[in-house]
Image: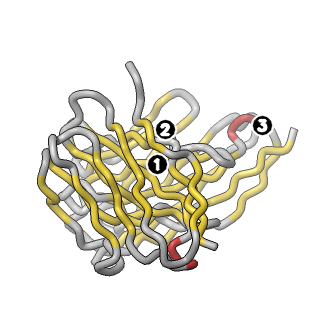
């Protein structure tokens, strides 16, 4: 079955710097890749997603890139702010809609 | 409109007891998913409904777990003979188009 690996597990940056989180997936049939942000004790919130027919998508300070050949995708956050501090999860969809999640990245943005 | 809601928010039970967890999806969303999240881990898929039927239950860990969605809206996850290892946050999500999934706040289950 599908397997999603996410790195790094923790990431600490200074406010204003960029943050990059990377994921790899194993099943080349996967065609939908969302990113979720989860604050402590809260529900996962969808922040951006990308489909396999697109190589890059941007929404203000957040962007996602997808390399289908290498089977990896990345989340880029620019001009980080303290409120960006949270756990971020990547996921891959196996066409059926069920999501296979990575292990998560704890992002700390230091003021 | 209202988001996905789940009840109860917290459930404490004793080993061996039966529990039911409820999920109210976003109105009109035909797809409904259950996930389980242990501390420090990503959500783990359990079961997925399209309408009233279970389209994929490959994530249910064993036959103590069962879920229903009789009218294609509200869903109930049922766990029999609970074990301490069942302790986790149980998340429900719903989707209109089987891509974008919107999560509920979860039910934190603690089995003593």
Q: CA distance from mark 2 to mark 3?
A: 16 Å
Q: Which residue is mark 2?
A: A47
Q: Which of the marked residues, 2 or 3, is nearer the chain's N terminus?
A: 2
Residue name at image x 16 percent, y 59 percent: B54
Q: Are marks 2 and 3 on the same chain?
A: yes
Q: Left of B58 or right of it: where is B6?
A: right
- Eyeballing the image, is A47 above or below A38? above
Q: Left of A7 or right of it: where is B103?
A: left
Q: Which residue is mark 3?
A: A82
List x then y, in percent, for residue A108.
76, 50
**Marks 1 & 2, CB-CB < 8 Å contact:** yes
* Near-viewer residue (A97 or B77): B77
Q: Left of B50 or right of it: where is A34?
A: right
* Near-viewer residue (B72 or B29): B72
Residue found farthest to the right: A111
Q: CA distance from mark 1 to mark 2?
A: 6 Å
Considering the image in quadrants, where does the C terminus of chain A appear? top right
Q: Which of the marked residues, 1 or 3, is nearer the chain's N terminus?
A: 1
Residue name at image x 38 percent, y 74 percent: A3
Q: CA distance from mark 1 to mark 3?
A: 19 Å
List x then y, in percent, for residue A40.
68, 48
Badge 2 marks a residue whose secondary structure is strand
Q: Which residue is mark 1?
A: A35
């Amino acid at each position: 079955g599908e397997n999603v690996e996410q790195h790094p597990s923790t990431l600490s940056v200074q406010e204003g710097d960029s943050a990059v989180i990377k994921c790899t997936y194993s099943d080349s049939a996967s065609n939908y890749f969302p990113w979720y942000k989860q604050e402590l004790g809260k529900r996962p919130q969808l922040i951006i997603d990308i489909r396999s027919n697109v190589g890059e998508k941007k929404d203000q300070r957040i962007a996602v890139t997808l390399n289908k050949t290498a089977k990896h995708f990345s989340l880029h956050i620019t001009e980080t702010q303290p409120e960006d501090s949270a756990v971020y999860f990547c996921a891959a969809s196996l066409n059926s809609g069920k999501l296979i999640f990575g292990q998560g990245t704890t992002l700390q943005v230091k003021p | 409109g209202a988001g996905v809601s789940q009840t109860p928010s917290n459930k404490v039970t004793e080993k061996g007891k039966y529990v039911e967890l409820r999920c109210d999806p976003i109105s009109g969303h035909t797809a409904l998913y259950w996930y389980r999240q242990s501390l420090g881990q990503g959500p783990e898929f359990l079961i997925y409904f399209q309408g009233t039927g279970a389209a994929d239950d490959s994530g249910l860990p064993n036959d103590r777990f069962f879920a229903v969605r009789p009218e294609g809206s509200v869903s109930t996850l049922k766990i029999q003979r609970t074990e301490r290892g069942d302790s986790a946050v149980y998340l429900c999500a719903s989707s209109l188009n089987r891509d974008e999934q919107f999560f509920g706040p979860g039910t934190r289950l603690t089995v003593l």
